[in-house]
Image (tube, rainbow, N blue to C red):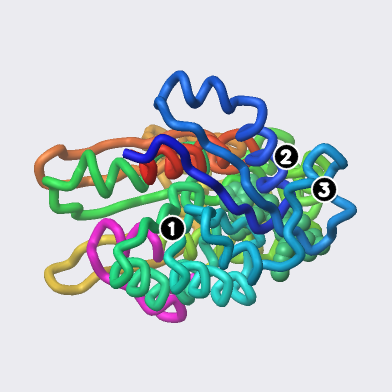
Amino acid sequence: MKRKINIGLIGFGNIGSAFAAYLISRKNFLKQKTGIIFELRGIVEKDVKKVPQSYRHLLFPSVEKLISTPDIDVIVELIGGIQPACKYILGALENGKHIITANKALLAENGDEIFQLAKRKNLYLGYEAAVAGGIPIIKDISQSLISSQIESMLGIVNGTSNYILTLMETDEISMAEAIKIAQKRGYAERNPSLDIDGIDSAHKLAILIRLGFGYSPEFTKIFKEGIRCISHLDIKYALELGYRIKLLAIAKKNGRRIEARVHPTLLPVEHVLASVRGVYNAVYLKADLVGEMLFYGRGAGKNPTTSALVSDLVELAR
Ligand SMILES: NC(=O)c1ccc[n+]([C@@H]2O[C@H](COP(=O)([O-])OP(=O)(O)OC[C@H]3O[C@@H](n4cnc5c(N)ncnc54)[C@H](OP(=O)(O)O)[C@@H]3O)[C@@H](O)[C@H]2O)c1
């Protein structure tokens, strides 16, 4: 076990800034709990105006410089998107750095090379923050449930869509109105397409499939239909018939085949996933030894995502 871990951070946005603040303000707390010092050693951010004065001494001029600095142990990538994130992570791995990332899009669409290189180089690749925020689903599947064969996974893994559907039901409003409210409250991007078209859910599903079934699905082959076409009347009539509409990410093992799809689904109101409301996420999983399990919690946001990132850091250090 290493006594000190030096961290290089790429991306000082919503999550990166919260993660950096945590590392600095909770350094002693983490040391007391783990016996390890986690040191934020360097930051690269495209828009340096975003970086407050108190962090400026940590700024590096380029990612290339950060990932080639010898005493940095791990690179935490928090810029999102496929490129240049992919190039940065591969470069860091080539330089012998461990990786922690929250980048579900990259791992789902272009993950093979990254997973393979990390394995070949015997380096840690942590991605707890990429799926379902603060819910420790990655570690549960890869560690606690390692003895079981997973049979199926049903997930509400996009908090934005779930929030919009919940609001359409409780406030009896249209999708456009619900999206506006979600945007105002910071739960939806200005362009909400990734969320409401099911793409973000499919990214997380692809990662869960790789982990749960040991198979790397071709992202384009995952069926994706989002909630864009759901009207408030659909929701009302479904409820009258005893159903709630939920955007589900579904993976099922079917002999040697794996079924993978994302689409709005009618769930009986008494189904455990039908009561997952607002921005919350849940994954309902069936596995041969343990039977049915439910994982529930906050799927995004600064604090839950920071919690997941720090859990990877501690796992790496141990
Ligand atoms: N937000 C959440 O709740 C959440 C939850 C789970 C996972 N995630 C994942 O966490 C990652 C970060 O999300 P976020 O919400 O923090 O995004 P964000 O607020 O947009 O932050 C990304 C930051 O990285 C900067 N950046 C972009 N390209 C860069 C480059 N080449 N070099 C250096 N800096 C660069 C951006 O600067 P500019 O703005 O100037 O481009 C921005 O400041 C994404 O992969 C996301 O999917 C987010």
- What residue sits 40% from the left and 78% below the top? 113
Q: Which amino acid does label 1 sit on?
A: His
Q: Which residue is at the front of the view, 17 or 178?
A: 17
- What residue sits 38% from the left and 75% below the top? 112
Would you call the spot at circle 1 few (<14 residues within 10 Å), some (14-19), or many (20 or more)? many
Q: Which residue in the structure is indicated by mark 1?
A: 98
Circles 1, 2 touching at the beta carbon (< 8 Å)? no
Q: Which amino acid does label 2 sit on?
A: Glu
Circles 1, 3 touching at the beta carbon (< 8 Å)? no
Q: Which residue in the structure is indicated by mark 2?
A: 172
Q: Which mark is residue 51?
A: 3
Q: Which residue is at the front of the view, 46 or 66?
A: 66
Write down the quadrant of residue 268 in the picture. Answer: top left
Height in image: 164 above or below 290? below
In screen coordinates, is 197 left or right of 264? Answer: right
In screen coordinates, is 289 left or right of 247? Answer: left
Residue 204 image position (x, y, % from top left): 46, 58
Q: Mark 1 to mark 2: distance in Å? A: 48 Å
Q: Which residue is at the front of the view, 257 or 166?
A: 257
Q: Which amino acid does label 3 sit on?
A: Val
- What residue sits 46% from the left and 19% below the top? 32
Residue 154 image position (x, y, % from top left): 36, 51
Would you call the spot at circle 3 few (<14 residues within 10 Å), some (14-19), or many (20 or more)? some
- State the extent of the magenta-drawn residues as a range: 206-224
Write down the quadrant of residue 213 in the picture. Answer: bottom left
| Label 2 CB-ligand 1 distance < 8 A | no
